Amino acid sequence: MVNYSLEKLEFKRILEIVMGFAGSQAGKELVSSLLPATDRSRARILEDETLHAARLISAEIEPPVSNLQGIIAAVRSLDSGAISLDPLHLRSAGEALSDMKDFSARVGSSTDTVSGILDTSIASIPRLDPLFRMLLRITTPDGELASDASPELKRISRKIQSLRSSLAAKLSAISSRLAGTGVLRDSPSSIRAGRYVLPVTAGRRGSVKGLIHDRSESGSTLFIEPAELVEGGNELQEAMLDFQQEKRRILRDATTALRKDIEEVRNGISVLSELDLVFARARYHVREKTSFPEEGRMDLRELAHPLLPHDSVVKSRVKLAEDWRVLVISGPNAGGKSVLLKALSLASICNRSGLGVHASASSSMPFFNRVMVSMGDNQSIAMHLSTYSARLSEQKDILDNGGLETLAIIDEPAAGTDPVTGAALAAVFLEEMADSGVRTIVSTHMGQLKLLAREKQGFYNGSMSFNPETLTPGFEFISDIPGASCTLEAAAIAGFPEDMLKRASDLAGDSFSLDSLVVSLRDLEETRQKELHRLTEDRKYARKSRKYLENQLKETRFDLEKKIEAVDEEKIRTLKDIQSRADSLLVSMAKTSSSEERRGKRKKISELAAKESPAGRLEKPSSSETVSPIQIGDHVQIEGWSVSGTVEKAGRSNVMVRVGSVLLRKKLTELTKIDHPEEKQGASSVYQAIEESPEANLLGMTVDEAIAELDIKLDNCTAIGLRRIRVIHGKGRLMQGVTDWLRRDKRLKSVSMASPEEGGTGASIIVLRG
């Protein structure tokens, strides 16, 4: 059933694509026999191999397989009993072994950056350095035996070259001597059977003494080796025999050396062939941009059929509930139901084959150790099987052999039989599948199965999108909603007369109405999904805008703090300058005897003192001035405050001062009596009505609400110059949350518990930075 299912799903066509990424015939053969893993551990190994190979490819490290077939042919010759391999096979074997060594060394030097599961296999590649160096030394790149393969062969080669040059020179001299005598033909001197000969006219054979080695087809020319060249020719032939003998010896010795390490060579061939398979999978994974989903619920995002063109395939998201057992897919003919069934099946198969799934990397899916398929027309006259009988046979096999980790794919379970009894049997079959733990995906047009999917636990509906206006399929999966078969719409496209369609609609009755209702429901769901997508995008935009505004607020606060620090520094520098100038005047006064000069310098000091106090700033009178006692109703300036208050109670050393709605207990030393703000000239710009109260009552709020309220309060108080605020928060959870937040706020100079008169532990006094 496994191979049958793979055949039905056209898995071989996918492997044919992967074979194109293999670099050797051995690798292609391994790809063609690739089968999906049947357990998690093996599937994970295949996945890790593919991903490691992909990383090596990105690092431009790939197994050398160009000479793999040559060394395989050499080993096969040895297995067949060959005593002496030809130089071409020996050269291929040497180059392959050299490539193995270089590849292994390169991977070994890159393990810090691209290490992985393939390291062990690569490390097992044999490093037969003496063998491959010998094979490369005795052969040439074009597969011939090198002339210096051995010292003896080199000596004989030089002797042969010398004899040939001598014989050629002598033959040329004889040819020149006989030229013009009519003894020789116009054709040049040549070599016959390794002997140097002259083309002599048959009628003048007596003019050249020597041995006849050949004759032309017409018989008019004889090829004669001159007598003076015979001894030299014999010596050349003997040298050639020595050369061939030495050559055979060298090839036999090289073959014997290769045979000695044959097992290691076989291991290298095996490892390199397997790596060719793995890298073919990796190249497919990279080019097709496949992924390896995490094991979990069925949630395949951007799922596509691997055999459909990338530029036109419609991708779907198939997301099912955790308790999913049966998915019933419905919709119009040619709407993509069967394609989706195959795509889901191949997702499991390709994932377990180390090829990856044609879905996004954020996908997940359950682990299925096998996929069993019932689809297509499998009728057989020889086996006496009709279409429906063949379907029943397939479904019975699934029923008998399916397990907890089986994915069953069934296309039209009741096709070819009575729709009523067929639907009833299909419903019972699906229930049995669900009870046995088999996960099933079924396509159908039957309303009974759609209703079953709505009512039974673990059963879910799904459909393929369809545009009722253009009467064209959209090929996209829609979860939870059954699809209409659109039979009459398809007939309209086919050109059926309108009166026939109307009569058919009348005969269909409720069934046709149900199809229309399903179409309407699907349209509503598509509208809902679009609206949901719009709201999601709006929420993303709002979050981005909020983050931007928060960053802007932080930057503004930071700039404000910098400006305040700069103003404070400038004020300190100005005060120091004023104090320095005042000190100079006081020193010079002591030295001045004239009363007029002393009065002038006192005036300058007063002017400097006026500069030291900014416009509108009120100072306490010096100890030399007469201070009138503070009484109830007096207006006073509180040290550290930019606003004034009114005395409501007065004691010997302490008084109660009203500032807005806040009653403060203060020492007399902290107060300065002032005129009424309205009566003091030039003070109207400073002592204006306070719009922000110096008190924040947070009782009754949550911690989050209180912090939000207090954050605004601090900004407002900073803006109007109010530095001291009383925060009422009670003694519970609200106090802890608020005080923790206040201590982290950089706008504050200090945070302290309020005095008993101001609320004690139920309130905090905060002072903003000046």
Image (cartoon, helix red, strand yellow):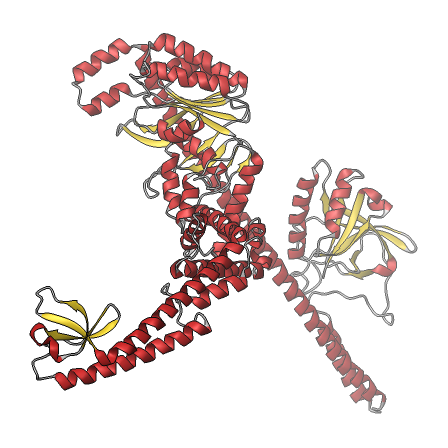
| Quadrant of res 719 | bottom right
Question: On the rendered structure, is 419 left or right of 489?
Answer: right
Q: Nearer the viewer, residue 697 or 582?
A: 697
| Quadrant of res 288 | top left
| Residue 119 visible in image | yes
From the viewer's perspective, is residue 40 above or below residue 615? above
Question: On the rendered structure, is 552 left or right of 244?
Answer: right
From the viewer's perspective, is residue 598 above or below residue 636? below
Q: Position of residue 710 (x, y in %)?
A: 68, 46
Name the residue: 50% across, 41% down: 292
Name the residue: 54% across, 60% down: 128
Name the residue: 92% across, 55% down: 652
Q: Position of residue 95 (x, y in %)?
A: 45, 61
Name the residue: 48% across, 38% down: 353
| Residue 100 visible in image | no
Q: Position of residue 536 (x, y in %)?
A: 48, 39
In this figure, what is the number of numbered marks? 0
Question: On the rendered structure, is 496 left or right of 454?
Answer: left
Q: Nearer the viewer, residue 64 or 464?
A: 64
Look at the image and tell me in which quarter the N terminus lies. top left
From the viewer's perspective, is residue 19 above or below residue 488? below
Question: On the rendered structure, is 107 left or right of 503?
Answer: right
Q: Position of residue 256 (x, y in %)?
A: 49, 58
Q: Nearer the viewer, residue 596 or 93?
A: 93
Look at the image and tell me in which quarter the C terminus lies. bottom right
Q: Nearer the viewer, residue 377 or 615?
A: 377
